[in-house]
Image (cartoon, grey):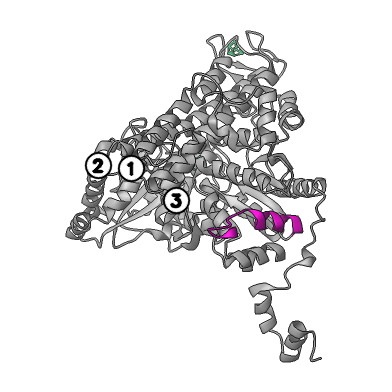
Amino acid sequence: MAKKKVRTPEEASRDAAAIALLERALQINAETCFYRADEITPCPIGADGLCCRFCAMGPCRLVGDVDMGVCGATRDVVVVRNFARAVAAGAASHSDHGRSVAYTLLAAAEGNPVYKIRDPYKLFEVARYLGVKVGDRPVEEIARDVAIAALGEFGRIEGELLYLKRAPVKRQKIWRDLGIAPRAVDREVVELLHRTHMGNDQDADHLLDQCMRCALADGWGGSMLATDLTDILFGTPAPVRAEANLGVLREDMVNVIIHGHEPTLSEIIVAAAQDPEIVAYAQSKGAKGVNLAGICCTANEILVREGVPLAGNFLQQELAILTGAVEAMVVDIQCIMEGLVPLANRFHTALITTSPKVKVAGALHLEFDEHRALEIAKQILHTAIDRFPQRGEVFVPNYRSPLVAGFSHEYINYALGGSYRGSFRPLNDAIVAGRIRGVVADIGCNNARLCHDENHYYVVSEFLKNDVLVVQTGCGAIASAKKGYMTPEAAMEYAGPGLREVCEAIGIPPVLHMGACVDNSRILTVLSQMVTETGLGDDISDIPAVGMAVEWMSEKALAIATYCVASGAYVIMGGVRNPLAGSPEVMRLTTEGWEQKVGGRLEFVEDPKEIVGRSLAHIDRKRAALGLEEYNPAKWGKSGDWRMRQVLELPFEARIEAVYGGRK
Ligand code: SF4
Ligand code: MSK
């Protein structure tokens, strides 16, 4: 059989470090996901959502003249059932992560010597939402009740999730009127799975309602709890400087990559890596010490709280091993490629699984137990250090970019107003005035079928030029960090005149890193607070904002998209084929249908230019609906550092003219 066309490194990635390592992969004949994506043609029937294998009378592939499965299931139902299963899996993943953090909080409250309550103020705030009395009780006692109340949200017997009241009042009413206010996190996931079983719910619109309810249980439940409880345990993020890209790996140190999503072990690894005993052990093997760097969302968690550098995003996990400089890759949950095993075997790298929920055949399993957290962290570091003398030829591309991360909603509130009058007022005012045209949340993954980071780079640069403030989480955030969009100085280079003025005045980057993929819940909180602040309508659906995942690949991304739509947002999923394409009716239901029901809509758009065009048009429509002035960049950019830099370059007389309007 003829070989498929394989992309060149330049066609496969827009990231210079990734390109260098893909060239290296070719030289040493190492296989990566980029190569496999070229080799494996995606099944067009599955890609359109038209393959059902939910019972043993199938699999039924609804193509050509076939428009019903053996049981009579229609294309509409098959497409929605496939989508629903993905939403359920995505919601379960985030939420089960949230549950684990709740158990860690419980352990901390019950005296685990390793974990502490680092943010008691956030604990008190969360306690109020969960109906836990604060008073003058000891912090540990409150933390214990908060952990138990949080765990209760997963299996609550009656009522609805307590966090729903954090949404704007109008939004809560929409959910209750439609009957999609989630009752309990686990219940909504289980019910969605139940309803997709063969011979069960067979009304596409009705099933889509449960998709929204399940996703809302993730966004306003499991994910939001994960974010809050992680902040309580490890600190609420505030701006922190770091660097991003594979050039952060050190040739003179033991490099340990932490990869996955949960910070509970990696936070302890960060502490253990600085332990004098560990440093001495590394030195005894000829290294200067231990250098930690992150991949995927564990990276984001450890970046925003500890300033640990980012080695890269999802598609760089295999490439990190190809540097030959990684002694251990420590993985926990989610987004871990099985392809790491054969690659690690070609080098001296120890691939170490740590979660009781995740083993990878061929990897070393050192299971995390929060009661022995420090001991296990040290065991992992010893394993890594022992590999250092086995290191062979090293190829670390010298690319890394500075960044500032850590923009929690608490910090944004503080940055805009200070300790005593923290508020979102200045942000709302900047949007009302038109300095900021609108807000875009570009979140989510990389996808090996696309040119790595290309869509992220393109859409973010276009939005910045157009005075759109960009907030990011997950692997999209890592793309922008590597590109250099996440420093305050980046506003001078990349932002339009209005956005630049705002960034200069507050001292923030034009692209705000808001954390890991569970931290999209922070974006929901920001949007709710913008509504509360007034001036931008009375619901999330009124705000000139768009959500997108322009290189999405995971089921979690579909869960996030669905909870954002159900919260009133316009969401565009980019890059790859529309998984609802097999049913025009389902596409209608999730666009016009959801817009009528919940004010948000879900679109799948492959072309990034089209994504930008539709987003700006939506932002301008929302501005007009609010009665705001038409966006006019010519009004801005006549003040600030950027303008001063321009003026200083003028000849003397022209400078007098520009600054004083002439000599008189
Ligand atoms: Fe086929 Fe229906 Fe079974 Fe699906 S549930 S595999 S459509 S018979
Ligand atoms: S890690 S889910 S590739 S963002 Fe959160 Fe990145 Fe997507 Fe995994």
- Residue annotated with mark 2: 376
Amino acid beneath label 1: Leu
CA neighbours of label 2 inside 10 A, class few (<14), some (14 to 19), many (20+): many
Tell which circle, 1 or 2, labels the residue nearer the N-terminal end. Answer: 1
Whether residue 174 appears in this view of the structure is: yes
Q: Report the front residue among 633 and 146.
A: 146
Q: Quadrant of residue 500?
A: bottom right
Tell which circle, 3 or 2, labels the residue nearer the N-terminal end. Answer: 3
Q: Is residue 326 left or right of residue 603?
A: left
Q: Disc 1, disc 2: CB below 8 Å? A: yes
Q: Nearer the viewer, mark 3 or mark 2?
A: 2
> How much space separates mark 1 and mark 2, taking CA atoms?
9 Å
Q: Is residue 470 above or below residue 298?
A: below
Badge 3 element = helix
Residue 652 at what x, y percent from top left? 71, 91
Residue 351 at what x, y percent from top left? 32, 42
Amino acid beneath label 2: Ile
Residue 151 at what x, y percent from top left? 43, 29
Q: Is residue 359 above or below residue 195?
A: below
- Residue annotated with mark 1: 265
Amino acid beneath label 3: Leu
Q: Is residue 289 left or right of residue 569?
A: left
Q: Report the front residue among 660 and 261.
A: 660
Magenta segment, which residues? 416-434
Badge 2 element = helix
Residue 422 magenta: yes
Q: Is residue 291 left or right of residue 492?
A: left
Toward the front, the furthest residue is 136
- Residue annotated with mark 3: 26
Residue 373 at what x, y percent from top left? 27, 41
